Image (tube, rainbow, N blue to C red):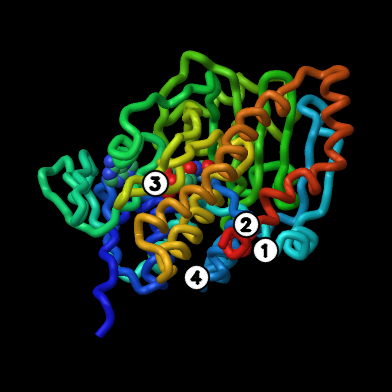
Amino acid sequence: MGPQPLRIAVVGSGIGGLTAAIALQAKGFEVEVYDQASELSEIGAGVSVGGNGMIVLDSLGLGQAVRDVSSNLQRIEFHHWRSGDIFYEHPMGDWYDQRFGGPFLGAHRADLHQVLLAGFDGTPHLGRRAAAVHESPDGVEIEFADGTKAEADLVVGADGLRSAVRHHVTGPDEAVFSAMSCFRGLVPVDKVPGGDKFGLTFFLGPNRHLVVYPVRGGELINFVAYVPDPEWTLESWSSKSEPAEAVAAFEGWNDTVTTMLGNVEETGRWALYDREPLRRWSTERVTLLGDAAHPMLPHAGQGSNQAIEDAGALATYLAMESLTPAEALQRYEHLRKARTRKIQMGSRGNAACFQLPDGPATDERNARLVSLPDNVAWIHGYNVFADIQESL
Ligand SMILES: Cc1cc2nc3c(=O)[nH]c(=O)nc-3n(C[C@H](O)[C@H](O)[C@H](O)COP(=O)(O)OP(=O)(O)OC[C@H]3O[C@@H](n4cnc5c(N)ncnc54)[C@H](O)[C@@H]3O)c2cc1C
């Protein structure tokens, strides 16, 4: 009989936590998942999953199920804010798949989450908000806010931007407010002029921009409309705003934008935070993953993808018999830190570039868009498993 498998507790049953739990189970570990939420409801709107995330999901046998509930985006296009005219476009669809080894999908977060929940062999323990983590040479104890406790050999903190597990690893730190927030919503496709033709669609203008794409097989159009606002600081996936506020914020923009913003049933509003990159992610028995490790602004569309890449990397290193668990955590952290830091910083830079006033700087940016497919290849064409092989 071989040694007992490691017992791993994953704190957070979001996109990263569930992907990690599935990947760890596939390697033979015993996994329990804990989440603060009392129920897993359909909160959220669109997330994008690119080739770099799909490589991991395909390796777990989940790729087809994710494709089935998503929209495979056929083109990328950039529109002028006032006229609506396209100033840059490029095919995606098969072209993207062939170049980057997987599709670029628009997914409703709830649909992606459902696929992951179905892929996890077990049920997350809900209503368990991690409050503290106690680590000893023999194991880890998680203390939950409801007074209950859980023990494990290793803990993965996948508990998002305001992670409690991170506090154990790095001590206190502050989220960084971007002074920007976004309106977001889902609109039935027949209520968006030209919505059935949308791929990954940007509308760029002075001080504002929108990212729009279909989800759920094209049934719904997801929009995120970014505005500078130092006053709106509420960071919550469920906070609401009036559709009229979004319409007013985009007054003077083209009809497609204003019609879409006005036709939404419910507008969410979400203040944008990230954090400075962490110096360390791991102790001997505890590590971080996804937004808990590297929360990023959404301007590179990589929040979910980086969490999914983390999950693939963590499970791969932990399964290596030549490494102790502590060594595996160090190797994981080392591999992931530089890449996620670069994407965190790039996401910050993209916002300014998307919101230039009309004029020479905009013309220059637009001329540079011809290199976009090559410029994003290091993100979208990345294969985390190949990188691990090279790192050995
Ligand atoms: C309800 C919800 C809706 C979202 N909607 C969108 C969206 O529409 N568009 C978008 O781009 N991104 C959205 N996100 C964020 C996006 O999913 C993440 O940025 C990205 O997928 C990285 O995943 P993650 O697993 O690191 O974090 P998340 O997917 O955010 O998951 C973190 C999980 O940790 C849990 N958690 C937090 N603190 C604790 C604690 N102390 N103890 C136990 N559990 C804890 C949370 O309940 C959550 O389930 C949403 C996140 C959530 C939680």
Q: Position of residue 301 (x, y in %)?
A: 61, 43
Label 2 sits on what residue type? Asn
382 or 44, which is in the foreground? Answer: 382
Picture quarter with the N terminus: bottom left
Residue 134 found in image quarter: top left
Residue 383 found in image quarter: bottom right
Label 4 sits on what residue type? Leu
Mark 1 or mark 4: whose residue is earlier in sequence: 4
Q: Is mark 1 within 8 Å of ligand 1?
A: no
Residue 86 found in image quarter: top right
Q: Which mark is residue 102?
A: 1
Give how far apart the Cα atoms at labels 4 and 2 are. Answer: 14 Å
CB-based contact (under 8 Å), mark 3 and mark 2: no
Q: Residue at x 31, y 31 (%)?
A: 171
Label 3 sits on what residue type? Leu
Give how far apart the Cα atoms at labels 1 and 2 are. Answer: 7 Å
From the image, tell me which residue sits under label 2: 52
From the image, tell me which residue sits under label 3: 288
